[in-house]
Amino acid sequence: MLTILKNQPRIIIPDTSPLIHLAAVNALTILQQIGQIILVDMVVYEATHDLSKPWATEIAAWIKKGSSQDDKRSIIVEQTEIGETFRLALITNPLHRMANAGENSIIDWLGTKLAEQNAIVVYENGRVPRAIERQGFDADIAIITTRALLGFAEVLGIINSGEALWKQIEIKIPTVNRASQITMIQCTTNI
């Protein structure tokens, strides 16, 4: 894990929960202090389309600021076929929903764009590690929960206490996934 952290890794967020959890305690900028953030269009949509939802406004502002040229694009929003399909479906049916669209779009994106780049994938949806493991990437990938990410932020000196921040998240979002899991997928070939 520490080798992945050495070179400002790409941080990929395949579901909205990590964004919501960090926004709840005003801690989204922790991600940018670790590396460059990659979001797919569906995750952005899911997190920000309804600004009346808790923390959607904060997440939208954070994405807008981080994806601007002035901020050296610390956040990149990748367009996906699933996202485009969903966008077009909304034109004809504004109430259209796609189950697991965020996770599916990130897996699609990973398969085409991340085949040989080390990364950290921050997730809460339990299907994410298995889906990534099935892809067979030629890269070192750390798949970690938000809670584990806070532990690494503490080790890196970005925050004083990952557990203290996690306790704040638990207070604001009592249904939060309390797991602190790390899955490493290590490259089997030399890149």
Image (spheres, grey):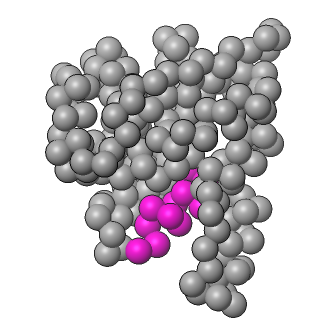
Q: How many marks?
A: 0
Q: Is residue 167 magenta?
A: no
Q: Which residues are magenta?
A: 37-50
Reply above or below: 24 against 58. Answer: above
- State the residue lying farthest toward the front: 175
Quarter where residue 97 is shown = bottom right
Q: Is residue 47 magenta?
A: yes
Q: Residue at x 66, y 33 (%)?
A: 130
Taking depth in this image into account, of 10 and 107 the one nearest to the observer is: 107
Quadrant in the picture for the C terminus = top right
Horizontal and vertical percent position of residue 127: 60, 41
Quarter where residue 138 is shown = top right
The answer to whether one can see residue 135 in this image is yes
Horizontal and vertical percent position of residue 24: 25, 51
The answer to whether one can see residue 13 in this image is no
Taking depth in this image into account, of 72 and 54 the one nearest to the observer is: 54
Horizontal and vertical percent position of residue 36: 51, 37
Reply above or below: 97 against 117. Answer: below
Q: Residue at x 36, y 52 (%)?
A: 20
Q: Residue at x 77, y 26 (%)?
A: 137
Classify residue 59 as left or right of residue 114.
Answer: left
Q: Residue at x 69, y 52 (%)?
A: 104
Horizontal and vertical percent position of residue 59: 37, 58
- State the residue lying farthest toward the bottom: 92
Reply above or below: 8 against 112. Answer: above
Reply above or below: 113 against 66. Answer: above
Taking depth in this image into account, of 160 and 130 the one nearest to the observer is: 130
